[in-house]
Image (cartoon, rainbow, N blue to C red):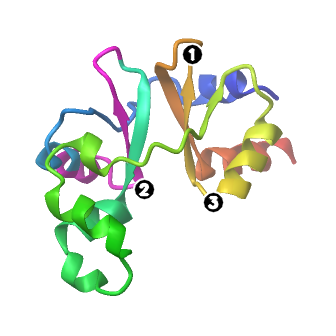
Amino acid sequence: MKIRDLMQRIEGREVPAVFQDSTIEDVIEKIVRFPHARLVYVTDRDERLMGTITVGSLLRHLFPYHYEGRIHGRGILRYITAQKAKDLMDTHDIHATSDEEVDEVLERMAKSGVKEMAIVDEKGRILADITAVDLLRYYHMEE
């Protein structure tokens, strides 16, 4: 099964995304609006995927004193001075395309430890996001 087939089953679901120049408050609002999401996608003004901000990164930024000793010294300045989404985002390029096989995407998710992944078009624009729960639904339906 291709990712595009899975996308048809989640058609119309909004993707939790903010622009890279969005404020941290905007990021918080988006995470609160999508309580089941573990991350927010960060895009440029053309809606191309630039990175992600996880709930964990946001918590480390907002409450660094609770993470004392768990934030590397080189990263502490980033968390303290962040004002925009681009300041907090992780730029690891983990995404999929609609032409990929579900099993390929699942393998990549497992290797990278992510539970959600953006599906992008040929220009890098976000079309949808696939979650671990979506993949569980796929597995359940295939039995």
- Give the mark nearest the N terminus, 2 or 1: 2
CA–CA distance in space, label 3 to label 2: 12 Å
For label 1, the SS is loop
**Residue 27 appears at what percent x and percent y?**
22, 46
Identify residue type, mark 1: Asp
Is residue 24 visible from the viewing direction of this image?
Answer: yes
Residue under label 1, please give it: 121
The answer to whether the residue labelled 3 contacts the one labelled 1, judged by CB atoms less than 8 Å apart, is: no
Q: Position of residue 85 (x, y in %)?
A: 24, 43
Element on which disc 2 rests: loop
Residue toward you, 128 or 50: 50
Instruction: Say which residue appears at 59% left-offset and 12% top-offset.
Output: 122
Q: Is residue 47 left or right of residue 2?
A: left
Q: Mark 2 points at which residue?
A: 38
Q: Name the residue under label 3.
A: 113
**Is residue 37 at all visible to an observer of this figure?**
no
